[in-house]
Image (cartoon, rainbow, N blue to C red):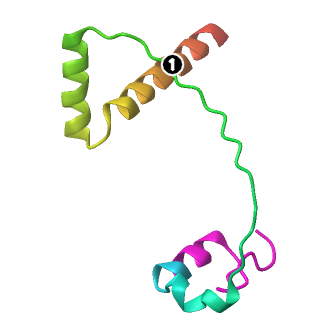
Amino acid sequence: MGGNKSSISKARSYREIGEFWDTHDLTDYDDRIRPIDFEVDIQSEVTYYPLEVSLSTALRSMARRKGVSSTTLLNLWVQERVRESKTRKAS
């Protein structure tokens, strides 16, 4: 990140911007802000797959013990298996 990205905080990195706003309030800078228009184009896809009830229950239990959501844990497992499969095919 080159140059100042934040005119209020004078920060030179996203970390510095975050640290600044962790200790400051935007309402203290009402006179220095202006409205802007921008568009966000988020293109994500979610595909649902049915799981047997017993697998879903076990998944939720394991995820809770690990401190993550069942969706996160399942995605991590599937990513790992796909990676392993690609590695085996490349060998």
State which quarter of the image contains the N terminus.
bottom right
**Left or right of 6, for residue 45:** left
In the rendered image, the vertical position of residue 58 relative to residue 49, given as above or below:
below
Dot 1, crowdedness within 10 Å: few (<14), some or many (≥20)?
few
State which quarter of the image contains the C terminus.
top right
Q: Magenta segment, which residues?
A: 1-19
Q: Residue at x 50, y 86 (%)?
A: 24
Q: Which residue is drawn at 54% across and 12% down?
A: 85
Q: Please tell me whether the stretch drawn in magenta is mainly helix, strand or loop.
A: loop
Dividing the picture into quadrants, the one containing residue 10 is bottom right
Where is residue 5 shown, x and y percent of the image? 74, 75
Where is residue 78 shown, x and y percent of the image? 45, 20
Mark 1 lies on residue:
47
In depth, the one of 68 and 39 nearer the eye is 39
Q: Residue at x 55, y 21 (%)?
A: 83
Where is residue 8 shown, x and y percent of the image? 67, 86
